[in-house]
Image (cartoon, rainbow, N blue to C red):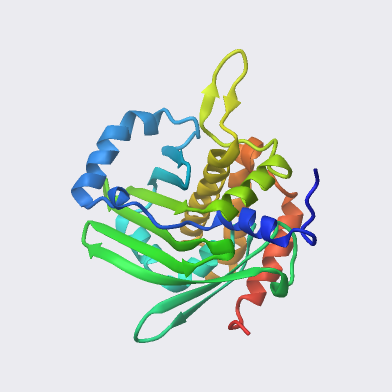
Amino acid sequence: MTFSKNKYPWIFLIAIFFVIVPMQVEAETFNPPQQLRAKYTELKDELINSQFKRELYMNSKESPDHLKGEIYAVVDYPFATVDKALNDSSHWCDLLILHINIKYCYASVNKADTVLTVDLGSKEEQSLADTYQVKFNFQQIASESDYFALGLNAKDGPVGTSDYNILVEATPISDKKTFLHFTYAYSFGLKGRLAMSAYLATKGRSKVGFTVIEKSPDVKYIQGVRGVIERNTMRYYLAIDAFLAAINTPKENQVEKRFQTWYDSTRLYSKQLYEVEKEGYLAMKRKEYQRQQQPPG
């Protein structure tokens, strides 16, 4: 059976939304500084011997109505640099637009709150009229000399989904290195479950995640819903990493540096993350970046 976007638009909206938008984070994923440093100690050997060829650990969990994906990683930047970069809400639009499915982001700041207007869509160039718009509240949860936590949350999403949230927290582990935790999770009902099943039966049928489920005779990776979560957990982490990598680049070259770095990083994991050729991605993102310089209509 083949599903078209025009005939079954809600199926593709929910599939796109599920793979790129985090939902409410479980309480136990929030780690004060001492707990986060303890987690680094616990994962130190796995980080050093990571399959990702960088100090990174990924985990995902699935239940009948709940999904969770998270990354713990060491980034080669001082804590103050990471803190300044990620706790500025306007930076998040420059970061989020790197993701291939995010077509627009605009930060509005007032005395009461900061709202990110985010449009979600396909992996090709797309009119904003054909995307799904979500408004995220940006919240600084904790800010200390050796720790920060922040969240982005949205009450409503497509097809009856709700309570969306991104959580990022970090703590220094040396003068030049920071331990970062990125996590997202979401719950879903019957419509969401049916939509994801349709996606996985068609467009997502052959796609894989990063968890190794069999090492011999050939390496086999997790598929299904956990594969979806893991692919996009990595895409978000690489967006954070690409933003940080461009900080010391001359300002006029930072946007292009972020685009180049994000795409090149995804190609390190082509089996999971390859979607389009580099020139196609760059041309699309240059246009989308220019479009998001204007406030939402």
Looking at the image, residue 136 sits to the left or right of residue 228; the answer is left
Q: How many marks?
A: 0
Residue at 42%, 61% in the rendered image: 165
19 relative to 248, above or below: above
> Where's residue 89, x and y in %?
42, 71
Image quarter where the C terminus lies is: bottom right
> Which quarter of the figure has residue 150?
bottom left
Residue at 21%, 62% in the rendered image: 144
Q: Nearer the viewer, residue 248 or 259?
A: 259
Image quarter where the N terminus lies is: top right
244 relative to 118, above or below: above
Q: Is residue 82 visible?
A: yes
> Where's residue 109, x and y in %?
42, 82
> Which quarter of the figure has residue 139?
bottom left
Residue lying furthest left: 34
Q: Nearer the viewer, residue 124 or 207?
A: 207
Residue at 39%, 43% in the rendered image: 73
Residue at 63%, 70% in the rendered image: 289
> Which quarter of the figure has residue 41?
top left
Residue lying furthest top: 217
Q: Is residue 250 visible?
A: no
292 relative to 77, above or below: below
> Where's residue 121, x and y in %?
67, 63
> Where's residue 258, x and y in %?
57, 59
